[in-house]
Image (spheres, rainbow, N blue to C red):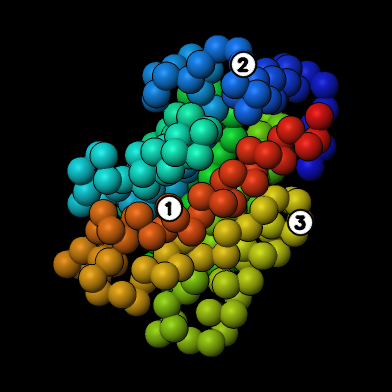
Amino acid sequence: MRYGVGPRYFNNVALVMRFLLLLAGLGSPFHGANAENNIRIMAFGDSLTAGFGLAPADSFPSQLQRALEARGLPARVLNAGVSGDTTSGGLARLDWSLSDRPDMVIVALGANDALRGIDPAITRANLAAILEKLRRKKLPVLLAGAYAPPNLGREYEASFNGIFPDLAKKYDVPLYPFFLEGVVTVPSLNQGDGVHPNAEGVAVIVERITPYVVSLIESVTQTM
């Protein structure tokens, strides 16, 4: 992934310098979620990122933030999840969400599109528009995929499930294939509705996705 020279370029330079100084044990220390120099990662999604039914400390952004801090990468993970949001809703609020000035973005939208049986062509177009906007902003992205429920039929399933790998390839962004991997079919990891993960389920998600997030952070240093 290449980044052009402009305001965002210099933001990325600052991020790289903070990252390298941290690894060297030099420079300004990182002191938790409100530290000025923290890496700002926006979790842009629906109820799965918003933390529906969970205490704030158990939500995906909070648990991911702690996981990164435990790896020596203090970060502020911004909770930009809206329960019930579709890709259409996400696209409509993207510019407003970016006012928080993240350094990188995890895009985790699409599950509600599938649950509502929205035309996959609409989902594809919305996600493409989101990724295009983020590319123009020179923001590194991790795309988190979703799978269609099998009861919608093979044709819908194939059309929907192909959206995420196709767009990851087109926009040259890393893909975490399925946000709920390891959780969706395990009752003990889900709340009573059988749809939303409980705190333990979120911990599984975070454990699996954290290496992808770390790789995204490292990719910034490799492109400079």
- The residue lying toward the viewer, choosing from 108 and 218, is 218
Foreground label between 3 and 2? 2
Q: Position of residue 203 (x, y in %)?
A: 35, 55
In the rendered structure, the answer to whether residue 60 lies left or right of residue 110 reads left
Q: Which mark is residue 26?
A: 2
Please name the residue that numbered disc 1 is placed on. 206
Q: Residues within 10 Å of mark 3 (few under 14, many from 20)?
A: few
Q: Tell me the kind of residue under disc 1.
A: Val
For label 2, the SS is: loop
Indicate the quadrant containing the C terminus: top left, top right, bottom left or bottom right: top right
User: How would you rate the neighbour count of disc 2 (Cα within 10 Å): few for under 14, some for 14-19, many for 20 or more?
Assistant: few
Which dot, 1 or 2, sits closer to the camera? 2
At horizontal 47% and vertical 74% (from top left) the residue drawn is 148
Residue at 60 percent of width and 21 percent of height = 25
Q: Are marks 3 and 1 in contact (CB under 8 Å)?
A: no
Mark-to-mark CA distance, 3 and 2: 38 Å
From mark 1 to mark 2, how far is it between C-alphas? 28 Å
Of residues 202 and 136, which is closer to you in this image?
202
Which badge, 3 or 1, comes first in the chain's sequence?
3
**From what the image shows, is residue 61 above or below residue 48?**
above
Measured from the top left, where is residue 30 in percent x and y? 48, 20
Q: Which residue is mark 3?
A: 170
User: For this view, does 175 lie left or right of residue 34?
Assistant: right
Which of discs 3 and 1 lies nearer the camera? The answer is 1
Disc 1 secondary structure class: helix
Q: Disc 2 residue type?
A: Leu
